[in-house]
Amino acid sequence: MLQRKGMRGMTRPVGRPKKLIDQKQFEGLCGLQCTTEEICSFFDITDKTLQTWCKETYGVNFSVVFQQKRNKGKISLRRSQFKLAERNANMAIFLGKQMLGQKDRQEIEMSGGVELSIEERRQIVRDELAGVGKNDRTPTKSS
């Protein structure tokens, strides 16, 4: 920070005082997948200040730091999900679908012993629809 000499020969800082950003809190917010806006709001700073702080602290811009720290949050979330899956069948099913590609299968059992192809089924439906209009007429008396 620049210094300026005052009237009495004493130096005083020029500009606003630096905002303090706690590195552990910042990394925790990244791990929780907070947005830039939310992080800036938490520390009461601008996005420009956040970018500058990241470059000074980590040597890279915010997006690079965020990617690294966000991945730690994902690991923590995954660990919690696996612990929950040990007690909760729904979570175990969810993880199986998401991570192992498992799917719900619905088996349809037909009774009657007659296997029809899709084309045969379509023809039956067409025949039934064609016959609907013919049988619905009521006979009228002619004079």
Image (cartoon, helix red, strand yellow):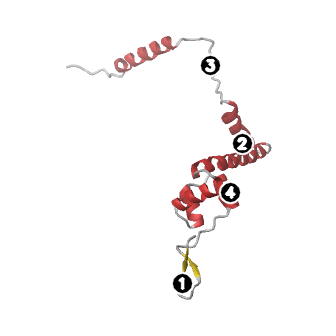
Residue 106 or 7: which is nearer the viewer? 7
Specify whether 28 is left or right of 86: left
**Is there a contact, CB below 8 Å, between mark 3 and mark 2?**
no
Q: Residue at x 68, y 39 (%)?
A: 94
Amino acid residing under circle 4: Gly
Q: Residue at x 65, y 24 (%)?
A: 107
The residue singled out by tag 2 in the image is: 91
Q: Earlier in the sequence, mark 2 or mark 1?
A: 1
The residue singled out by tag 4 in the image is: 28
The residue singled out by tag 3 in the image is: 110
- State the separation of the CA atoms marked 2 and 1: 66 Å
Mark 1 crowd level (few <14, some 14–19, many ≥20, 10 Å Cα): few
Amino acid residing under circle 3: Met
- State the separation of the CA atoms marked 1 and 4: 42 Å
**Is there a contact, CB below 8 Å, between mark 1 and mark 4?**
no
Position of residue 121 measured from the top left corner of the image (x, y, whole percent): 50, 14
**Is there a contact, CB below 8 Å, between mark 2 and mark 1?**
no
Quarter of the image for residue 23 reads bottom right
Secondary structure beneath label 4: helix
Residue 6 marker: 1
Position of residue 87 measured from the top left corner of the image (x, y, whole percent): 79, 45
Visible in this render: residue 32? no
| Closer mark to the observer between disc 3 and disc 2 | 2
Position of residue 20 measured from the top left corner of the image (x, y, whole percent): 63, 68
Residue 9 or 123: which is nearer the viewer? 9
Quarter of the image for residue 138 reads top left
Position of residue 89 measured from the top left corner of the image (x, y, whole percent): 75, 41
- State the separation of the CA atoms marked 3 and 2: 32 Å
Quadrant of the image for the N terminus?
A: bottom right
- State the separation of the CA atoms marked 2 and 4: 25 Å
Quadrant of the image for the C terminus?
A: top left
